[in-house]
Amino acid sequence: MRHARICLQCAFAGFIPTIARSLFVLFLALILTGPVFGDEPDTLQVHYLDEVVVSGSVKETNELENLPTAVSVVSPRRLQEGRVESLPALSALVPNLFIPSYGSKVSTPIYIRGIGARLGPQTVGLYVDNVPSFNSSAFDFEFQDIQRVEVLRGAQGTLYGRNAVGGIVNLYTLSPLTYQGTRLAVSGGSHGQLSLKASHYSRLGVNFGASLAGYYKRDDGYFMNSYTGQKMDASENAGMRLKLEWQVSPDFKAMLFGNYDRVSGGAFPYMQVDSTAACFNEPSSYDRDLITGGLSLNYAGDGYSIHSTTGFQYLEDDMRMDQDYSPRPIFSICQQQEQRSFSQEFTVKSDLQSRYRWVVGVFGFIDNREADTPVALEKGMVEVLQQSLDAMMERMGAPLRLVYASDRIALPGVYIKPSHGVALFHQSTLEGIFGVEGLSATAGIRLDYERTGLDYRTESNGGDVNIVFYPPLPLPPIFVEGDTLLVGSERKAFWEVLPKFALKYQLSPTTRLYLSASKGYKTGGYNEQVFSEVLQSALAESLMRNVFKQIPPGVMPPMQNMGAKLVRGTAPTTGMPPTVGTPPATMKPPMGGAMTTVEEQASFAPETSWTYEVGGRYEVPDCSLSLSGALFYSRVDNLQLTKLVSEGTAGRTITNAGQSESKGLEVSLRYLPYENLSLFVEYGLADARFVKYETQQVIGGDTLFDFAGNRVPFAPRHTLSLGVSYVYVLPNGSMVDRVMGNVQYSGVGRIYWTESNLDSEGNALYQPFYGLTKARLMAQKRAFALELWVENLFNTRYHAFLFEQNDLVTGRTNHFVQRGYPTRFGATLRFTLDR
């Protein structure tokens, strides 16, 4: 893995000039060959891509605009007006969609209707040109030439399977068979922002098209690290995309695409809540290489169609984090992961024009992820452990001292997580049921199987001690080896049946009502990060066992409470930090503690949900007004939550927390009062709460046993977007052809940060509702356009992320935050020639 990363980094050093030369040559070739092979005359014109070109779905038995579910379709024009250049910015255009940024692209959580996950298996699925992504580390990439974005809200398990509990996001890129042209864009702004984009789409024959696109983006960062005196979150991003399409015959079409994306830069700008800058000594960064490819084959028969989608994704990244977020050498982590994912889906679907429509399909995948996650307990942490050892020996009345032989304890580990699965699914839609025109029923079912596992090898280095005897014992110091090694393998399998039912009543061609019920499923698995805690417990047991073997008989006084149980959330009296849980089954727990297996500590169960909703859509015949809305209720069982282990001293882990429910509503309104003026409103309410969550935590001096009724953390209660756009067309002969301006306000909140909804002192802990305003002004003359833009116009201050962590040195509970981005502004120059 490391050798491959070095090769990629070396390649990236010369990436930009090489890509620039390659793009220039290929652009020139495509531009020159397009007119040669095309049958149509080469007529250049300025093209305004304002509307969505909607193609049929390879799965749905209803047309996209008539789906019996809540769906938002975002056009290229709205993406450009909102400066949506990556997935997190999409939040502003869809009700009840929230995609926060938590300091790096290592994790891009998606929340829909209060359902989401910060880490682990995703709760909302992402597809690009029908190819799924298997890791949320691959979700945040640069948008370029997006043809449309579809957001399906609510459980979508029947057609999409695993990890679609909250919904699905589908992205589709432009096709060189339906669009031909050249696009160039150069953008610069505050905070060192620079962006270069280029793409070309051409027909190389009557039935063959090719496109090539590339981009480069950078910034200087936004937040200071006072320890180094430098910005800590500067970033650089570059990539390219190639797409080939061939209409082999009127009935058969093939599409092949490949994407490469490279991210490099600082990460995790976490600072104390009362600070204006972070202050930590260890490096914090995130580097990622992402390759995605797909092959799509489509055959249209007589009354049916056959579709095949083959997907591949390769991800390799390197994350480094100072996990105590302080200038002291206490706790750091370095995680390198390498993942290869293959997927294959076949569907056979009937003609959408018939009264009875159906689809059957089979889906399979193979996924293999290898993570190398060395954790280091630095000098400051070893000093804390030494104090615990000294206190333990003093309580025992022992005439000796245990002294760590090293000022650093390393906990390296390699974890391989293989998984594979297969699914069969079917969906049918019948029009005119009960003899009622416009009334249709949709029903479907999916059988989903998955087998996942964990192969681990982790050890400790530096956990040895010296036994130093006090006078008058005439004994020399004794060296005791305390390091330990854990090697093992775990496997588990899941079966799920995922049904769906829906009724739709089409009152008119532009008005419909629907109600639906559907089940979602989120896969279970294993936590590799919990092994920091598991290994610390094993190291504690190994150390004490070896120490007592080396101490001569009669030196130690009689031991008291040797049979005491290890209390969950407290430290075994071995000088190790507090741990949650106990040593693995292969280790005897210290002081007679209860036995817990690796399977019990590291695994988490699947999460399932049922979503019930009723909604509708209305549009006036001239399309000047459209209104859609829905009421929904979702219930989640075995809810997966990300929690700090041992109050932040052993990383984070995923646990199942009982049950939750989310209920609410969403409304989308589009209004065009005049030809060149458009208004929109997007509002979502999601009241997501725990129904059952048994726990035992001491908060503010009180012991809490149940979080039932508390709000689910990290998911906002409200989302709101308001926007206005105006286009002014100037007379012929003017300096510019048209001027466009738009203003958009987006707000979210409130957002709770803990399962208790409280801080450690018992006070409410949340981010209040806040709103951000962005504006854009563009002047266009033929193929050229100049944009002036600003984001967070009023420099609104807010917390994008907040968490609590205990300081083992001072004993205080600190609040760390990632602040929201400040005001940013800049200009973009575009050149667009469409054939």
Image (cartoon, helix red, strand yellow):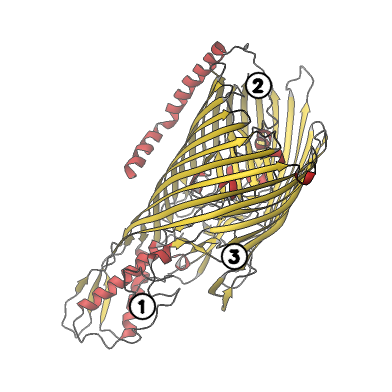
Relative to 118, residue 433 above or below: above
Disc 2 target residue: 783
- Asked if the residues shown at circle 2 and circle 1 are in contact, with their CB atoms under 8 angstroms apart, the answer is no
Q: Secondary structure at mark 2?
A: loop
Amino acid type at image mark 2: Ala
- Do we see residue 84 in this rendering? yes
Residue at (31%, 68%) from the top-left corner?
586
In front here: 49 or 311?
A: 311
Report the disc number at residue 659. 3
| The N terminus sits in image quarter | top left
Residue at (24%, 78%) from the top-left corner?
548
Amino acid type at image mark 3: Gln
Residue 340 coordinates in the image, percent (x, y)? 41, 43
- Do we see residue 715 in this rendering? no
In front here: 505 or 406?
A: 505
In front here: 491 or 833?
A: 491
Question: Which of the two discs, 3 and 1, sits closer to the camera?
Answer: 3
Disc 1 target residue: 573
